Amino acid sequence: MPFMQNLSNAVVLASTYILMAVGLTMVYGVLKVLHIAQAAVYTIGAFIGLLVFTWVGNFWLALAAAMLISGVIGVLIYRLTYHYMLDAPRTVPLIASIGMFVMFTDLLQKDFLMGPYQKALPAGGAGLPAVKTAWFSLAPKQLLILVVTAVLLVAVYFILTRTRIGLGWQAAAMDRDMAAAVGVNLNRVIAFNFFLGSALAGAAGVLVGVYNNSVFATMGDLPSYKAFIIIVLGGMGSLPGTIVASLLLAIVENFLVASIGYVLPRDAIAFLVLILMLMFRPHGLFGQE
Amino acid sequence: MIIGGYVISVAVFVGIWVTLALSLNILTGYAGQVSLGHAAFFGIGAYTSAILSLRYGLPFWADLLGAIVVTGLVGMVLGLPSLRVRHDFLVLATMGINFVVVAVFKYVDFFGGAMGLVNIPAPSILGYSFRGGTPYLLLVWAFAFLTWLVSWYVSRTWTGLAFNILRIDEDAAAAVGVSVPRFKVYAFCISAALAGGAGSLYGHFIGSVFPDTFAFVESIAILSMVIFGGVGTLRGPILGAIILKAAPELLRVVGSYRFTLYGGLLVLMMLFQPMGLLGDDSFLWRNLTRFFHRRPEAEEVVS
């Protein structure tokens, strides 16, 4: 049945959006910074995954390496830039973020890194089987994305609700100064936040690279802009809102855009949605004034 | 295509980008509305002028005027999101506007699609053709000077004062009776109109316009120039545009790493000199002014 098939495709698409947007939402929640440079981390994650997979040939190892290195890069980005801009006007870290994004993307296109080509990442479904039911079927690749996303989200949930540093993050997201006053180590919490968010973005990069069997230097552009649409839709800084908004955007793209997509490409429509949202519901679909 | 020597064409480009940087400065530097969609206005001007010239056969000066008027009006409309969102989310909205405008250029047949619009005639005014490089160079820089004059004039009027308080504190502006929506729309309109003029000059110089010329990265380049030079000053954007536009053209190493340079500069400026090289109270400007002010003071002490 095409409806269920469309829906399951949308959920797969939404999974990659969620991995990208959760990190951005966490950063926005604590620092109020729109971390555009995360798009570069996503691409770097895909690149690391490609390198490790080419060397070792094991998808899980490639995923782990990509997440680890992406996380470290995320922490470095924070320590070297945003850390010094916490009290500056909000456009200062934003412009620095855009600068980093442009710089990384340009550097990645050079021949000594990725070059301006698409490269294949033929991990297939990493040994997972195909799923076939009466209503929908999932290719091994799609199942892989769903499984990895589900595992990572459960892990994030447990880290944020059951560990000391996760509770520290929740406190910092409510009120940074107050959290610091009651003894939360803000430096550690924020660094951890960047590690987690960037690792998730790196995982998203690898998964999308495997899914499309292609990795290239500018692959981060569109997902990152869409991640911002999701943050706005989801009400900025709310993790459940982010997940619902990811699903919503993916479903809208899969169903609605298929019928009016001939007027403008789907990405332009996504941006129109963003502009209209910002104008008429700037606090998100579920947010309150 | 009118190219009178490589250096002249580089100088023409620099002049156009000086205009763009100065026009963005009115919006971002004066009125405090950071925009990452300025290349969209540049593109709207270029496309308006190209269409007026190709489809309606209008002369050059009419294209230029038309581009300024149309882009100014479109700028007013596209500035409307700024009435609802502030700061970083306005940046997102302008970024989105840039993408949508480029997508419209690319996918709507009226605008020539991905193939762009070509064979725009060389400009001429009252029968005098600007076919040579140097006259056109003068024209472009005359327009850059006009943009500078507008910036200078605006900064000295009541509108300029309103922009100032808008940038510093919107709530305070509303509290003292400055109509925030009105002046935001003014800022977008003036800024867009001047960028539209630059677009017309660009289209007539190159002889063709393509959607990707006006993509989001060009907005980043223009913003880099304003911020690098000194946002909110009359001198800064000129210096920023001259250095950042000429360097990639003249130095090959810089040319192939153009966006690494722009991006890296944005990060470094935000870290160490958020006010820009020649901004008020920047390291360079402080020392320059001190250097030029010390001598008269010293003479006074001696006498």
Image: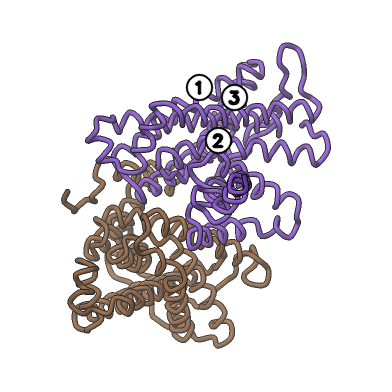
Question: A35 or A246: which is nearer to us?
Answer: A35
Q: Residue furthest right?
A: B5
- From the top left corner, tell me how far across and down residue B208 is, in percent: 67, 33
Q: In this view, does A63 lie above or below B251?
A: below
- Residue beneath label 1, please? B69
Alpha-carbon span between mark 2 and mark 3: 14 Å
For disc 3, the chain is: B
Report the mark closest to the observer, 3 or 1: 1
Q: Residue at x 22, y 35 (%)?
A: B175
Q: Where is residue A187 in the image (x, y as percent from the top left)?
A: 33, 77
- Asked if the residue under mark 3 is in contact with the one under mark 2, i.e. CB atoms within 8 Å, the reply is no
Between discs 2 and 1, the one toward the N terminus? 2
A206 lies left or right of B173: right
Closer to the eye: label 2 or 3: 2
Question: Which is more toward the observer, A37 or A55?
Answer: A37
Q: Indicate the secondary structure of the residue bearing disc 2.
A: helix
Give amino acid for label 1: Val
Which residue corresponds to the image point at 44% horizontal and 29% vertical from the top-left? B189
Q: Do labels 3 and 1 share a chain?
A: yes
Q: Can residue B55 be seen in this view?
A: yes
Res. B216 visible in picture: no
Residue B186, image x and y in percent? 40, 28
Provide the letter of the chain coloured brown. Answer: A
Q: Position of residue A60 (x, y in %)?
A: 44, 84
Under mark 2, the amino acid is Phe
| Location of residue B97 by image quarter | top left
Q: How crowded is mark 3: few (under 14 residues within 10 Å), some or many (20 or more)?
A: many
The mark nearer the N terminus, 3 or 1, is 3
The tint chain B carries is: purple
Q: Residue beneath label 3, please?
A: B51
